[in-house]
Amino acid sequence: MSDINNDSVVGKNFITNIIDEHNESGRYDGRVATRFPPEPNGYLHIGHAKSICLNFGLALDYDGTCNMRFDDTNPVKEDVEYVDSIKEDVHWLGFDWDDRLHYTSDYFDKMYEYAVQLIKSGKAYVDSLTAEQIREYRGTLKEPGKNSPYRERSVEENLELFEGMKAGRYEEGEHVLRAKIDMASPNIVMRDPTLYRIRKAHHHRTGDKWCIYPMYDYAHCISDSIEGITHSICTLEFENNRPLYDWVLENLEVYRPQQIEFARLNLTYTVMSKRRLIQLVQEGHVSGWDDPRMSTISGMRRRGYPAEAIRNFCERIGVAKANNMVDFALLEFSVREALNSTSPRYMGVVNSLKVVIENYPEDQVEEFVFQNNPEDPEAGSRMVPFSRELYIEREDFREDAPKKFFRLAPGREVRLRYAYYVTCTDVVKDENGEVVELRCTYDPKTKGGWSDDGRKVKGTLHWVSVAHAVKTEVRLYDHLFTKENPMDTSDGSDFKDHINPDSLKVLNECYVEPALGDVEPGFKCQFERVGYFCADYDYTKEKPVFNRTATLRDTWKKIEKKQK
């Protein structure tokens, strides 16, 4: 990792307290080895970013290591595309696994040997119940389960059946391998959980070598053990699975890491389930995994979120033991904070209205000096052309302006940023009565946007010279959902019922200053007085496209309040 220089990446929390206790007692010989184990069955989202920052951050804070391990145990849902996207996301966030890239499939042979060992010690058996029967036999939270009629098969029969499963002699669902633990356990996870199932599918790495695949709870702990992981950091939904994690390693008598659970990230106005995200993509509610409205890391990158902002956000929300809902506004605050100090300022008009300065020479063009970023003295400056005809924002004009409207109105004088004072003298309308053009005059003595006679104006407008403007497409993004928690279905609704119909607005009559006419996709800037924008991947010199990354301030709450 090259661009993170904080003294502490993660900060102190209950997990670091556990690690400190382990280091003081000499457990794991003072080592700290974590891992990030994504399933390659979809793109990563902001919740994964929290786990990435935590696992890689702990390794950095304790001068340890963090492995990247793909949990590729379900070939039906996995794809190389997802593997590549996950690698890209982790690197983009600023972390690296060096030479510690692993796959659970690397350990399939060893896992099979361990399964045979459990069978021989009487700790596992081949069950021939159907999936429905297994669920029925498992019992409920109030009632204990009951033993499968196949639970007491002999070791020899189990070995023969398991070998037959591996050899492909049985169909999917015909047999599974289960741990023999306790069907009356108060923890349902411990009621003879499945360790292996038959999956006759091509694996993206092992090809057709295997037709049986280990379950996550079995594969995960063994992978951690083989890699010498010290602290296996999981989200809270795996808390009930920790006894199984420990049981497998104890009964195999192998090295045992410590599993620790923390609260996953829940973010307002988003969904964090891969299954739901896949639905949004496959059903066409969004344009793809990297749609800027998605909670995916690739979507946020395309929207223009800086990696620094996501890391700072993850640090701000901290690491907790209890699940809670984080306000999306906090993420947007982190984005604005990062962009404010790094983004150059440019002028862009999103909803244009033409202005003609009637007393300005028709063929004259001046250039004014603009600061690239007032927050960064090293950012320098640029020259911006000014001419007789300009574009301003339509919302910067009101024909019947209220008293506290300090922008342009008939007879009112305003400042054009870094240029001149202008006064609106006439309004041109079309046949429908819509304002299509303003006629103004300028004061030549106010060059640079300041008056030497002491008079002051309260309004300052941004502008773009018509003759030099670059026409561009602007995509305005807002929350994908209108409901704070779309997954709350207590009212009988489906999460898709709350998709925001105004989450994307595409504007094609937008104009930016010439300096933005040939930037690279991913270029980030602030349109002065409008918001933060990022050149989209679709951007070309012939068709400039900018995504709005964030408004200059949080307007969502105000809009929501008005709607109520």
Image (cartoon, grey):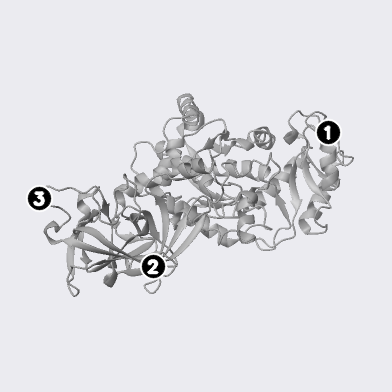
Locate residue 367 relative to residue 158 in the image: left or right.
left
Task: Look at the numbered discs 2 and 3 and tell me whether their residues touch, using CB distance below 8 Å.
Answer: no
The three-letter amino acid code for the residue at tag 1 is Gly
State the SS at label 3. loop
In the rendering, which numbered label is found on residue 145? 1
In the rendering, which numbered label is found on residue 389? none
Q: Can residue 304 be seen in this view?
A: no
- x and y percentages locating residue 75 in the rendered image: 67, 57
- x and y percentages locating residue 416 in the rendered image: 23, 57
- Crowding at dot 3, Cα within 10 Å, few <14 / some 14-19 / many 20+, comes out as few
The three-letter amino acid code for the residue at tag 2 is Thr
Q: Can residue 365 be seen in this view?
A: yes
Relative to 403, residue 141 above or below:
above
Residue sitting at the far left:
452
What residue would you read off at disc 2? 472
Using the numbered discs, state the Cα–Cα distance from disc 2 to disc 1 in whole angstroms: 64 Å
- Crowding at dot 2, Cα within 10 Å, few <14 / some 14-19 / many 20+, comes out as many
What residue would you read off at disc 3? 453
State the SS at label 1. loop
Residue drawn at 21 percent across, 59 percent down: 422
Residue drawn at 34 percent across, 39 percent down: 6
